[in-house]
């Protein structure tokens, strides 16, 4: 940080010398002390110092000088640097100049000439203390304002979050209520088929609500910094294989083919097994969810020197460029919609991104509208090989 500056202005050489001596005795080397003999010169010096990012803590100016008068100089300095403390040295009966300086330059003190050395030094010390206190106060105020703005933003986000959650819970809840009421009041008149259909709708709705609540709990765990990652050397291949097996029936119901390509038997990475499962589950479930009937999903696993990478590529609707930055945000319901009436909370990819980062990995989306999407997730094979995040990779 640049030194704090003190500027003294007086046309009398003897006064300047004496001020310099007093300042040397009063202030430490942390201050840069400048002597000038007239107002215009002092003002130019002020401008130069400010341009060089110096702070001007104190200006001590004579009152009556050739050219610019002391009160006018202090007024100009106050405009340039409002926090600078100003002191005026006065002769007898210079009331007008003093009152001008008080009114327009927030004059801190005036000192009558000839001054008493102790008086002058004490005034300078107090003036500098006052400058430093004001400065600290301004910093605290700014920090407080920034924190306040951050809290307001957080509160707004929380409100939006609550609004979305309430909305997403309200729909299945009202369906449950309508269904349950119907069975309760019209039980005698309903066919067995109607009862079974209504009860299975109720089951679907409770499932959706559970899914949303589970995702919300995951988000809460992540955002509160309580997510625990237990790193182990894990073979990613069987995890992918088990997920392919799990999703095959859902895909087949939509006439979607899932192809799984794995050239080697083992693909070991240093990760948390359960979290990897959750990440890949989300990506594969999305591929199945957003791909239309009759299309294909390709899943590949590969190894580089440092990473194990999995590609989940679909022939779904793709994601247009303006929507891509929103993909990994909370409640990102984009244009693409489930093709088989599946449920969607809009939290899956947000959770994926956080989990992958917690395991020092990366997740990318390469997609073009109408041409399908490819999600690539990479995990390091050991601790020193974390992924550097760049581009659309998260
Ligand atoms: N493979 C994909 N193809 C096309 N759009 C996709 C694909 N994956 C995700 N999206 C879009 O991104 C949005 C966010 O996906 P994300 O997985 O976060 O939420 P979701 O699938 O809607 O809900 P869930 O929380 O149940 O996973 C989706 O709503 C969808 O519009
Ligand atoms: Mg999803």
Image (tube, helix red, strand yellow):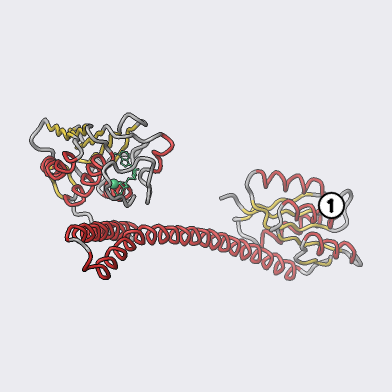
SS label for mark 1: loop
> Residue 95 appears at what percent x and percent y?
89, 66
> Residue 70 appears at what percent x and percent y?
84, 56
Q: Residue furthest left?
A: 265
- Left or right side of 309 for 103: right
Q: Quadrant of residue 385?
A: top left
Q: Residue furthest right?
A: 93
> Residue 373 appears at what percent x and percent y?
30, 34
How many discs appear? 1
Q: Residue furthest front?
A: 189
- Left or right side of 150 for 258: left
Tell me the residue at 34%/58% (across/down): 223
Tell me the residue at 34%/30% (across/down): 370
- Left or right side of 121 for 355: left
- Left or right side of 237 for 96: right
> Residue 80 appears at what percent x and percent y?
73, 51
Front-lying residue, 187 or 302: 187
* 282 over 256 or under it: above or below: below
* 326 over 139 or under it: above or below: above
Front-lying residue, 49 or 267: 267
* 268 over 113 or under it: above or below: above
Q: Residues within 10 Å of mark 1 (few under 14, many from 20)?
A: some
Front-lying residue, 37 or 164: 164
Q: Quadrant of residue 158?
A: bottom left
- Quarter of the picture holding the C terminus: top left
Q: Which residue is mark 1?
A: 11
The yes-or-no answer for disc 1 within 8 Å of ligand 1 is no
Tell me the residue at 28%/63% (across/down): 179
């Amino acid at each position: 940080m640049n030194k704090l500056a003190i500027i003294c202005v007086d046309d009398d050489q003897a006064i300047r010398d004496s001020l310099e001596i007093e300042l040397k005795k009063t202030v430490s080397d942390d201050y840069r002390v400048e002597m000038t003999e007239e107002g215009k010169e002092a003002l130019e010096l002020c401008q130069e110092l400010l341009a060089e990012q110096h702070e001007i803590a104190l200006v001590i100016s004579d009152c009556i000088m050739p050219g610019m008068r002391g009160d006018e100089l202090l007024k100009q300095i106050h405009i340039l640097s409002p926090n600078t403390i100003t002191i005026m040295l006065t002769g007898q009966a210079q009331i007008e100049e003093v009152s001008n300086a008080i009114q327009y330059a927030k004059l801190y003190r005036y000192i009558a000439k000839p001054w008493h050395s102790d008086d002058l030094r004490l005034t300078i010390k107090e003036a500098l203390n006052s400058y430093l206190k004001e400065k600290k106060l301004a910093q605290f105020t700014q920090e407080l304002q920034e924190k306040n703005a951050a809290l307001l933003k957080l509160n707004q986000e929380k409100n939006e979050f609550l609004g979305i959650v309430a909305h997403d819970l309200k729909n299945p809840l009202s369906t449950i209520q309508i269904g349950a009421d119907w069975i309760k009041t019209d039980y005698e008149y309903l066919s067995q088929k109607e009862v079974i259909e209504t009860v299975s709708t109720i089951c679907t709705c409770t499932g959706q609500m559970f899914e949303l609540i589970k995702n919300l709990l995951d988000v809460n765990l992540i955002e509160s910094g309580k997510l625990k990652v237990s790193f182990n050397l894990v073979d990613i291949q069987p995890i992918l294989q088990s997920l392919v097996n799990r999703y095959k029936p859902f895909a087949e119901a939509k006439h979607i083919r899932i192809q799984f390509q794995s050239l080697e038997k083992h693909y070991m990475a240093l990760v948390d097994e359960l979290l990897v499962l959750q990440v890949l589950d989300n990506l594969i479930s999305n591929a199945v969810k957003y791909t239309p009937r009759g299309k294909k999903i390709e899943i590949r696993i590969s190894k580089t020197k440092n990473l194990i990478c999995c590609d989940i590529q679909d022939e779904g609707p793709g994601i247009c460029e303006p929507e891509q930055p929103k993909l990994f945000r909370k409640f990102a319901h984009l244009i693409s919609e489930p093709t088989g009436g599946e449920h969607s909370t809009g939290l899956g990819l947000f959770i994926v991104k956080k989990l992958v980062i917690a395991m020092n990995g990366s997740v990318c989306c390469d997609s073009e509208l109408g041409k399908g999407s490819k999600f690539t997730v990479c995990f390091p094979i050991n601790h020193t090989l974390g992924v550097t995040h760049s581009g659309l990779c998260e």
